[in-house]
Image (cartoon, rainbow, N blue to C red):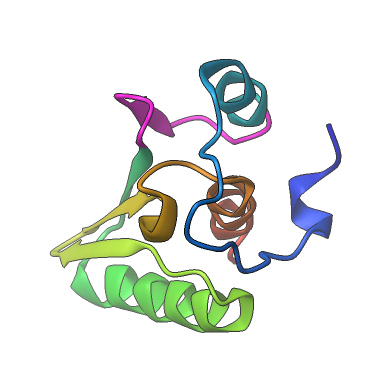
Amino acid sequence: MNDLLSKKCIPCSIGAIPLNQEEIYDYSKNLKDGWQVIEGKYIEKTYKFKDFIEALNFTNKIGELAEKEGHHPDIYLSWGKVALKLWTHKIKGLHENDFILAAKIDNID
């Protein structure tokens, strides 16, 4: 499988086919620890921080990346924690874009 970090999210259209279980498994192997596949429909991960401002700064960096990639996660921000949920709403399932964005989020400084 190609390196997810070198790819860019590309728009998909309504009616595109979500990834199957085997494809999800293959893409998941390329992510850092902590990502969970839930019901084969989305991926999620929680990041921990020492305080609110660190969590907020991380959230803002995710926002900048999401805008650049044109693919946006659901984000839950609280004191010392950022929880993310990724899936492709148009197809009601997982797409390569979700794994590309997840890999890039894991590499935010």
| The image quarter in which residue 41 lies | top left
Q: Position of residue 23 (x, y in %)?
A: 63, 24
Residue 40 located within the stretch drawn in magenta: yes
Q: Is residue 79 left or right of residue 67?
A: left
Residue at (64%, 52%) from the top-left corner?
Answer: 100
Q: How far from the left and from the top, in percent, is residue 25?
A: 58, 19
Extreme left residue here?
A: 79
- Whether the magenta-drawn stretch holds residue 57 is answered as no
On the picture, is 106 further left or further right than 1? left
**Magenta region, residue range:** 30-41
Name the residue rendered at 36%, 73% in the picture.
Answer: 59
Looking at the image, the residue that sits furthest to the top is 22
- Relative image position of residue 47 (x, y in whole percent): 34, 49
Q: Main secondary structure of the magenta part?
A: loop
- Residue at figure coordinates x 43%, y 34% from the top left: 35
Which one is nearer the viewer's eye here, 100 or 39? 39
Q: Is residue 96 left or right of 6 when viewed as pictured?
A: left
